[in-house]
Amino acid sequence: MTRPPQRTGGRVGVFGPLSHLALVVWAILVIFPIIWTFLGSFKTNTEIFGEHPLGLPATFHWDAWGRAWAKAHIGQYLVNTVIVVAVSTFFTMLLSSMAAYVLARYRFPGSKAIYLLFVSGLSFPVFLALVPLFLTVKNLGLLGTHTGVVIVYVAYSLPFSVFFLTAFFKTLPTSVAEAAMMDGASHTRTFFQVMLPMAKPGLISITIFNILGQWNQYLLPIVLLPGNAEEKWLITQGIANISTNAGYEADWAGLFAALCMAIIPMLIVYIVFQRQIQSGLTAGALK
Amino acid sequence: MRHGKLSSASPMALRRYGFILAFLAAPLVLYVVFVIAPYVQAFQIALTNWKGISPDFDYVGFENFGKMFADDVFWQAVRHHGLLLLVMPLATIAIALFFSFLLNVGGGQANGRRTGVRGSAFYKIVFFFPQVLAVAIVGVLFQAILRPDKTGVVNSVLGAVGIDPVGWLINPDLALWTIMGVMVWQAVGFYVVLFSAGMSSIPPEVFEAAALDGAGRFTLFFKITLPLLWDTLQVGWVYLGIAAFDGFALVQVLSVDRGGPDNATTVLPLEIWRQAFTFSKYGYASAMGVALFFLTLTFAVLTLRVTRRERIEF
């Protein structure tokens, strides 16, 4: 029995309009602070602190953006962050897919134990490790270097990535890899040329997950890139520093411009990849 | 014949083990040195009086723990986690459930299928957005929005309807609630998407059958959606509970004087960070780390025990 296309509400009453109103209100709560910050970056301090903090700027001055980029080093911090996150995401994906593949597809003594060792990392709060981690990085002479940050990012991204990708490799059919081995491909070649392309959807989800997670890190940068390594700082700590240390002669428009420089790239990436990002971030919870 | 088999099998097995070793060595070494070893060392350092200046330290047994239990700030932080644990997950889950129900089921039927209200796709995109922002960035953003005088956005909106400026972050009775509000603001979108995924896996016939029996939205929500979504809810609860034991970035960036006013918003991660990197009290900081670990563990174990229920198969 086919029905004609029709919409029939449940109980409409007051519940319908009210619930719609709630959605609209929440959407405004989410969007408005961001728009206000964006407009604030064009305002003068008197416009920001004046009678109408919600008003539009009289003219659109771009100089706050210039100040934030050059004087507050936001440009430098952005470049640093892009480099660190690109390198560490690359190595996270390479190392975690290698480990996950071996753990998912090869039985050998200790394989289960190694898998559990990786997964156990998911259940510890990073704050427990903070002091010894800091000392390890310091003793290796990597404190205040991007190399140190990259290594730590990769290490702390491994548990979840290995966990997720192991489950993913287990779902892939074995026949293709077996055929490749029959044709004389080595284990390594089979992995890079056959298995990795097949695992693309899982790899994409986890790559997005890691890029976002590492881009948004705040704790590890402030511990591993202390105050005397200011030219090495990453975007989150740079912006937090402007806001906490600038004090009362703060250049608010400059701060807002800096915030926009951190927010807008994420906004663009999110809008372009929103489907993958939503599934990438929630995939872990549903596994 | 036996000999032949061995000589052909053995290089293959050797290659296989070589491959396994080559692929596991780098990730495993990195993980053990930078993740596992620090976790183990933390328990050891917690038993020392190490101040970090000199390389020598003494084992002082449980002295750090004794000091910690006598420390008011520690108990303040623990109470804050308790409040966070009570309020933040409940508020987030309630709001997110309400929205995800509206966005997936609340729109009535079209072609015999339950759909979300109009504009569902748009709302799902917008609500999720705070999730991709760094917590530190969100902290700085809300510092401007919640300024205590008339120039803060929230206060100027309140001013327009004749309410005096509220000291969102400078009033010690209010500051933690304000910070919880910001946490909820950022988290809701993630759980809307998570619960939506859970709801879309409920077969539409279930809703259809209930609707045919005359179930309204309330019945659909409480009698059908909620029980069938139990697993996803449990996952959400564990995630939010773990988040309630963190709060570092937001409190450190957003609150007055990092955890103030007067420690009114401090949390254990912040105290650990402060003791270690401001006062170089590595031993004491690690003891707090151990306490945090056991608190988190207790929460996780209790949750899994209490919320365990028979799974509804569909």
Image (cartoon, grey):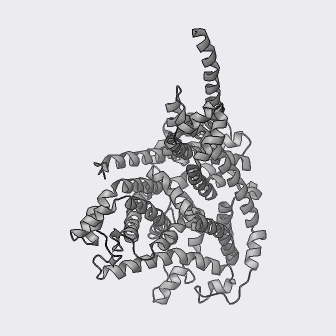
Pinpoint residue A270: horizontal percent, then vertical percent.
59, 65
Examine the rendered structure and indicate whether residue B94 appears above or below residue A164.
Answer: below
The residue nearer to you, when weighing A63 against A8, is: A8
Residue name at image x 73 percent, y 77 percent: A64
Pinpoint residue A136: horizontal percent, then vertical percent.
66, 40
The residue nearer to you, when weighing A147 against B212, is: B212
Count of numbered tags: 0
Residue name at image x 63 percent, y 14 percent: B7
Residue name at image x 63 percent, y 29 percent: B21
Residue most extreme to the right: A70
Q: Quadrant of residue B130?
A: bottom right
Would you say B226 lies left or right of B165 here?
Answer: left
Would you say A36 lies left or right of B84 here?
Answer: right
Taking the image as drawn, is residue B292 in sight? yes
Q: Quadrant of residue A176?
A: top right
Residue most extreme to the left: B213
Pinpoint residue B72: horizontal percent, then vertical percent.
46, 54
Residue name at image x 59 percent, y 78 percent: A35
Taking the image as drawn, is residue B167 in sight? no
Pinpoint residue A82: horizontal percent, then vertical percent.
71, 58
The residue nearer to you, when weighing A6 against B170, is: A6
